[in-house]
């Protein structure tokens, strides 16, 4: 996966998990490029696409900030983050010949084991 996509996914995940909240400022393009040892254009591309998607917003005189979500959107964003992982897991379950009920049972077991 390209670096800009990885950055985008990490930011989306941090928002969905609550690590980043509405109005939180993101590091500047330059600062993040130094931290991650990436070209600033890579960071700029990720930020630009997230801004285009309505995830981030640019405020006058400030860096990019996390855009506030409506309450209905929060749950949707969380499910959107989970869906790609489950899609991959569903493909593996199909290849192994597991029934949907068996796959769901395993998923529930994994969820129960993952609780702190």
Image (tube, grey):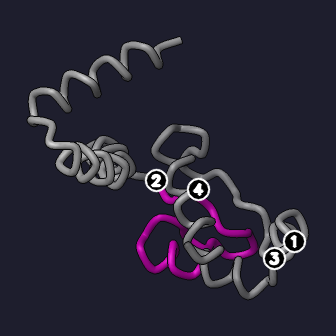
Q: How many marks?
A: 4
Q: Which residue is mark 3?
A: 38
- The residue sitting at 35% across, 50% down in the picture is 77
Q: What residue did someone put label 1 on?
A: 37
Which residue is under mark 4?
10
Residue 116 part of the magenta segment? no
Frontmost of labels 3 and 2 is 3
Residue most extreme to the front:
96
Instruction: Give the residue pinned by disc 2.
Output: 68
Residue 101: image location, x then y, percent: 9, 28
> Disc 4 to disc 3, how far (Cα)?
15 Å
| Magenta residue span | 47-67
Mark 4 closeness class: few <14, some 14–19, many ≥20 residues within 10 Å: few
**Image point (51%, 72%), residue name:** 50
Identify the mark nearer the N-term, 1 or 2.
1
Q: Residue at x 30, y 41 (%)?
A: 75
Q: Residue furthest bottom?
A: 41
Mark 3 vs 1: CB contact within 8 A: yes
Location of residue 102 with respect to 1 vertically, above or below: above
Q: Is residue 92 left or right of residue 29?
A: left
Q: Is residue 115 left or right of residue 57?
A: left
Where, by quadrant of the figure, is residue 44 drawn?
Answer: bottom right
Distance between the alpha carbons at the discs numbered 3 and 1: 4 Å
- The mark nearer the N terminus, 3 or 2, is 3
Could you tell which of marks 4 and 3 lies nearer the N-terminus? 4
Q: Residue at x 10, y 36 (%)?
A: 100
Q: What crowding class fits label 3: few (fewer than 14 Cα within 10 Å), some (14-19), or many (20 or more)?
A: some
Q: CA distance from mark 4 to mark 2?
A: 17 Å
């Amino acid at each position: 996966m390209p670096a800009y996509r990885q950055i985008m996914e990490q930011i989306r995940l941090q928002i969905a998990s609550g690590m980043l909240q509405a109005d939180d400022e993101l590091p500047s393009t330059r600062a993040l490029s130094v931290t991650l040892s990436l070209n600033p254009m890579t960071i700029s591309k990720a930020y630009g696409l997230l801004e285009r998607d309505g995830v981030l917003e640019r405020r006058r005189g400030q860096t990019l900030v996390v855009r506030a979500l409506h309450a209905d959107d929060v749950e949707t964003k969380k499910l959107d983050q989970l869906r790609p992982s489950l899609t991959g897991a569903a493909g593996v379950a199909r290849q192994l010949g597991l029934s949907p009920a068996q796959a769901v049972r395993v998923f529930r077991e994994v969820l129960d084991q993952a609780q702190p």
